[in-house]
Structure formats: C-alpha cells, structure tokens
Image (cartoon, rainbow, N blue to C red):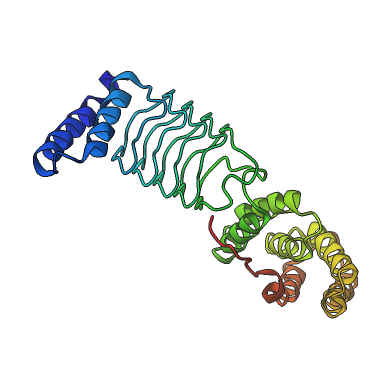
Amino acid sequence: MAQRNQTIQGAAIAAICGLSLSLPSGVIAQSRSGNDLLRLLEQGSCKNCKLQDSDLVHADLRDAELVNAQLQRSNLSRSRLDGADLRQANLSFASLLGASLRGADLRGANLEGADLREADLSGAKLDPNALASSHWKGATGVSAEASSYASMHNAGVEAAQQGRLLEAEDYFNRALLKNPDAAITWLARGITRSQQAKLQPAQQDITYAAALFEQQGDTATALQLREQLKQLERKEKKQTGNGYGSGFLRTAGALFQQLAPLAMKMFAPTPF
C-alpha cells in the first residue's frame, strides 16, 4: 500500500507541513486529520480516522480498512477502493466520481449527497436504499435493492429521453422490482420496448398498465391506453405476410409515442 501511494504521500506531507506553518497552533483537529491521512496511506488501515475534507483523488486504497472513518466532503474521485471495508463510514457529500468500489463493504455507511456518478459498485455490499439520497448517474453495479423506486424510475426516464433505450428498459425493470404496482413504470417500459420494435412485450406492458390504472382509480388513463391498443390491433389485422413491416412498426411507434407524456414523468426526490 505504501509503495502504491508514494506520490500521494508526498503531496500529503507537503500539505501537512504547509498547514503547520499557516494555521494557528490551536487547531489540533487539522493536525490529527493530517496524521490520520499519513497513517492511511502508509498502512492501508485507519479505523475511526478523521479524514473529512481529505484530497484522495486517484488514491490506491484497495482492501483498506476504513471502518467508521469520517470521510465527509472528501475527494475520492477516481480512487481505487476495491474490497475496502467502509462499514459505518461517513461519506456524506464526498466525491467518489468514477471511483472503483468493486466488492467494497459499505453497510451502515452514510452516503447522503455522495457523488457516485460513473463509479463501479459491482459486488459492493450496500444496505437497502443506501443510494436513495446519493447521485449515481452512470454508475455500474447498482442493484434495485440499493436505491429507491423513484430513483430507478427517474434514471430510466432520463436514459429513455437520451435515446439509451436498453439502459432505460433495465432501469424500469429494476424500478418494478421495487414497486410492481407502479402503473406509470409499466407504461414507460412498454413505450421503451416499442421504440426497440419489441411490440408484443410492449403491448403486454401497456395492457397491464391500463389494468393497474383502472384498479387505482384512474379510469381516464386506462381508457386512453386501451384505445391506443385497439388502434394498433386494427392496424395489425391489416398486415399481410409474416412479421411486421416497416410501415406497421412506424405506425405502432407513433401510437405508443403519443403515450410518452403520460409515462415519462419523474418523481421527487430526484437524486441518482
């Protein structure tokens, strides 16, 4: 661990020396923070350390022991935290942009406001809904259990609006694992599937969405969905030959696209 972080250690030592010259002698907390930072980089272990506001960009902290570490507001962008033990750590409002956290243990960690965009969370251990109040757009390895229904649905909406249809469908799948009675998400997934020419699954999703809307008292939306499905069925009966022609696919896509304003709604809170 020490060899892998020589460059960072040098920068840390320089920063600590600078602090000792410029800060009042009574600021003991800063001194302890600097000592804890050196301990982490040299030993790869710093349980209960006070590391808030630390600059650990690109730090190699694989398998580091950071149980109950205070890392709030720290910059861990692009750091390597694979296998790190971060149980009970405070990572609130920390930057983990593009960090690798494969197999890291984050159970009990405070991730409120943490920036996990583009991070790799494959195999990471997380509490249920641990990412509900963090920002994880573009992150990989995010499970349905780790985030909220709203965050998953919102991520699907954004991906669909940007034309990332397979990704959008996957987010809607995970949102439905969290809330299988969410009519709007069934509708959103159906539209996303129709845009990929998956017409039969799309029709099934929209049919089920209509049933849910009706059960939940929104009969107007249920009727609108069923009318669109009837129009598609009439077009389908006029088809000749096997399979769907390009004209029919365009018609189906246009019909389902009329439903997009109903489906592509986001929910608060919106962080992901």
| Residue name at image x 35 percent, y 43 percent | 74
Q: Is residue 224 above or below residue 82?
A: below
Q: Quadrant of the N terminus?
A: top left
Residue at x-position 34% and y-position 41%: 52
Residue 107 occupies which quadrant of the picture? top right
Residue 31 seen by the camera? yes
Could you tell me residue 222's position as x and y percent? 86, 74
**Where, by quadrant of the figure, is residue 242 drawn?**
bottom right
**How many numbered tags mark residues here?**
0
Q: Is residue 238 above or below residue 65?
A: below
Residue 244 falls in image quadrant: bottom right
Q: Position of residue 116 (x, y in %)?
A: 46, 46
Tell me the quarter of the image containing the C terminus. bottom right
The residue drawn where x is 71% and y is 77% is: 258
Is 37 displayed left or right of 48 in the figure? left
**Image side of residue 271 versus residue 214, left or right:** left
In terms of depth relative to the viewer, which is nearer, 265 or 16? 16
Q: Residue furthest front?
A: 26
The residue positioned farthest toward the left in the image shown: 21
* Residue 165 percent across, percent down from the top left: 62, 58
